[in-house]
């Protein structure tokens, strides 16, 4: 039977630590250090230093109990002047949270799941989450996680019997009561009946409604 040297050293150190005086044993973030007195009062020398394998989950290592921060949002691509929500999906049971929302209002939060975070200007923005529990804290920053596009001009007009929308990437015309109008996907539409019409356009993946 083969036994990992690190495992053997771990148990030797652990048993030794149990029977040594408490002042001889130090814990440094999951590393057991057995000390013995050197020359000079109150001085210590490191006699054993054991650094556990990072995969030693069965030993319940402190490093494996630190939070692993992560999050999601209700949206990440939208037109400016929109508000969204964030959800904490961190691992290892964090008990406190510190959020930073660049370019948003509010720009910070200590809620686990912040809501109504508003981006009133266009651009790309980072989001940072610091998650903490009794063992410590860890941080994640998602660069350019939020992209807020310029809101297209809200305008349509008509000439004679035809409705027109501003130039865009795509178009879809609707009638308020009837809903989507099939095949009405040009920047213009000729109404066949009296009604209230509007057009949804997309510009660089940003949607906006133009109503008439």
Image (cartoon, helix red, strand yellow):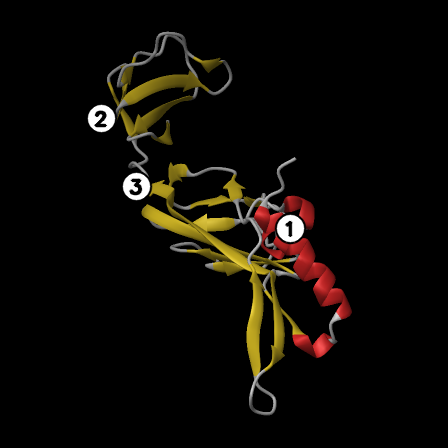
Comparing labels 3 and 1, the label whose residue is closer to the camera: 1
**Mark closest to the chain's N terminus, 3 or 1:** 1
Residue at x 27%, y 26% (from the top left corner) = 157
Comparing labels 2 and 1, the label whose residue is closer to the camera: 1
Specify whether residue 96 is in view: yes
Residue at x 38%, y 50% (from the top left corner) = 126
Q: Which residue position holds label 1? A: 8
Give me the C-alpha separation between circle 3 and circle 2: 15 Å
From the viewer's side, name the closer residue of 36 and 70: 36
**Mark closest to the chain's N terminus, 2 or 1:** 1
Give me the C-alpha separation between circle 2 and circle 1: 72 Å
* Looking at the image, residue 192 lies above or below residue 51: above
Q: Which residue position holds label 3? A: 150
- For residue 28, side relative to residue 144 (left or right): right
From the viewer's side, name the closer residue of 33 and 91: 33
- x, y percentage for residue 117? 50, 50
- x, y percentage for residue 103? 38, 55
Judge the density around disc 2: few (<14), some (14-19), many (≥20) Cα neighbours within 10 Å.
Answer: some
Q: Say if mark 3 contacts mark 1, CB within 8 Å.
A: no
* Looking at the image, residue 17 lies above or below residue 5: below
Question: Which numbered disc covers residue 167?
Answer: 2
* Looking at the image, residue 49 lies above or below residue 74: below
């Amino acid at each position: 039977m083969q036994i990992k040297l690190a495992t053997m050293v771990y148990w030797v150190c652990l048993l030794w630590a149990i029977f040594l005086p408490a002042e001889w044993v130090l814990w440094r973030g999951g590393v057991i250090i057995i000390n013995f007195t050197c020359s000079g009062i109150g001085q210590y020398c490191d006699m054993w230093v054991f650094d556990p394998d990072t995969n030693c989950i069965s030993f319940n290592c402190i490093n494996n109990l630190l939070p692993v921060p992560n999050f999601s949002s209700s949206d990440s691509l939208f037109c400016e002047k929109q508000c969204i929500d964030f959800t904490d999906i961190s691992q290892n049971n964090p008990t406190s949270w510190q959020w930073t929302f660049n370019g948003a209002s509010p720009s910070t939060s200590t809620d686990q799941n912040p809501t109504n975070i508003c981006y009133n200007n266009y651009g790309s923005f980072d989001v940072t989450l610091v998650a903490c529990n009794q063992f410590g804290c860890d941080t994640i920053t998602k660069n350019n996680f939020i992209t807020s596009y310029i809101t297209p001009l809200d305008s349509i007009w008509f000439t004679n019997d035809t409705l027109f929308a501003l130039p865009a990437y795509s178009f879809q015309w609707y009638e308020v009561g009837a809903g989507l109008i099939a095949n009405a996907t040009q920047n213009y539409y000729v109404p066949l009946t009296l009604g209230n019409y509007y057009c949804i356009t997309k510009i660089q993946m940003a949607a906006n409604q133009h109503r008439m």
